[in-house]
Image (tube, coloured by chain):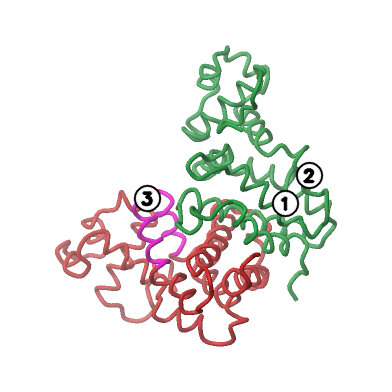
Chain colours: A red, B green
Amino acid sequence: MSRTGRRPGTSTTREEILAAAAEAFSVAGYEATSMRQVAAAAGVDPALVRRFFGGKEQLFSAVVTDVFRPEQALPMLLDGPRAGLGERLAAYVLGLLGEVERPGPLLGLMRSAATSAHAAALIRTFLADEMLGKLTRQLGTDHPELRAALAAAQLVGLAITRYAVRVDALVTADPAELTAWAAPALQRYLTGPAPR
Amino acid sequence: MSRTGRRPGTSTTREEILAAAAEAFSVAGYEATSMRQVAAAAGVDPALVRRFFGGKEQLFSAVVTDVFRPEQALPMLLDGPRAGLGERLAAYVLGLLGEVERPGPLLGLMRSAATSAHAAALIRTFLADEMLGKLTRQLGTDHPELRAALAAAQLVGLAITRYAVRVDALVTADPAELTAWAAPALQRYLTGPAPR
């Protein structure tokens, strides 16, 4: 997957707009990105962007959905033994984050969240309603919101320290090694016994 | 402890400068803060700030040291059963972070790191040489740098999601509850078996 989230082969106009939007939000941040700029970058009329997505908020949410692809990711995460859930989640997110020198589209979303409370709120709602929150509710464990939030905290921390702060030991570790280290923590947050 | 890291009772000029610097770095960020501003905020001559601390880099490092207090924290963390290390570390860092509505001085340092690569590098070096890196080396386990980095990643993630992104379930959880949830993950990173 290229860093703008574009799939190989022919791409539709909708996908081209999403790719241009992902790039714009990643580089300029949520607040500084306009529908007009995205349209120009995708080589289409601003009216077409509005017709496809509505406003900037919906366009950003569409980029978030396009990065996480919950309709494919959730069945993949829930499929297979429950004891492997932490490992599947770690591998999925580290895959979205990509190589340190060539990060994937997820890092751009995190940058947008870091610089805009509005973008942060949109991502937070998406994670709670469409991704991790939905995952923990489908697992049927106690404390679904807290478990989803703790797993998110673990993954956000890995992303920040590896890709933004670039802590040496995390940069040089390969994704498989990091997955193996982080999987038990995620597994415990998602399915382990609640403390006390 | 107040949010500027000031201790109750009489404070020395050095402590007043450190408190003013912590506040300035937290509010304006590392790059935008000048020695002159810190001196003005502390009500002293800029030459005195230079005499105490040297340049801005050393002043920032002094604030970092003043927040973490490694000479007290490390013995506290290493004291007691090794199986309680994760819990002691979680409680120590959540204590430094403080209440969500009244965060402690650590959050300001994280903000500085988020907006300045230079501040991030200073904190990274401090954590590796004086805090978590020293802790894992004293534990004598394998992979000391990677273990320290994974523990840092877990703690950074909790801090970001609770204090900056303000994920509901983490904001409403109290520090003791969060400590109990995060302790096993930290314990495993610091002292658990390396994967494979």
Query: Upstream in the sequence, badge 2 or badge 1?
Result: 2
Residue stretch rendered in magenta on the structure: A106-128
Dominant SS of magenta comes to helix
Instruction: Name the residue nearer the viewer: B153 or B95.
Output: B95
Q: Which residue is mark 3?
A: A117
> Is disc 2 in contact with disc 1, using a CB cutoff of under 8 Å?
yes
Q: Is residue A119 magenta?
A: yes
Circle 1 sits in a helix, a strand or a loop, which is it?
helix
Q: Provide the residue designation for mark 2.
A: B76
Screen quadrant of the N terminus of chain A: bottom left
User: Tag 3: residue type?
Assistant: Ala
> Which quarter of the picture shows residue B168?
bottom left
Circle 1 chain = B
Query: Which SS class for mark 3?
Result: helix
Q: Residue furthest bottom?
A: A80
Q: Tell me the number on the disc at residue B108.
A: none
Question: Who's the residue at 60% across and 27% down the image?
Answer: B56
Determine whether the residue tagged by mark 2 lies in a helix, strand or loop: helix
Judging depth in this view, the residue of B94 and A107 nearest the camera is B94
- The residue that label 1 is drawn on is B88
Which residue occupies 37% across, 56% down?
A121
Residue at (58% x, 44% y) in the render: B97
Where residue A131 sits: x, y (%)? 43, 72
| Residue A28 location (% of width, % of height) | 35, 51
| Vertical arrangement, residue A159 with respect to residue B104, above or below | below
User: Tag count in the figure?
Assistant: 3
Quadrant of residue A127 in the image? bottom left
Pointers 3 and 1 within a single chain: no
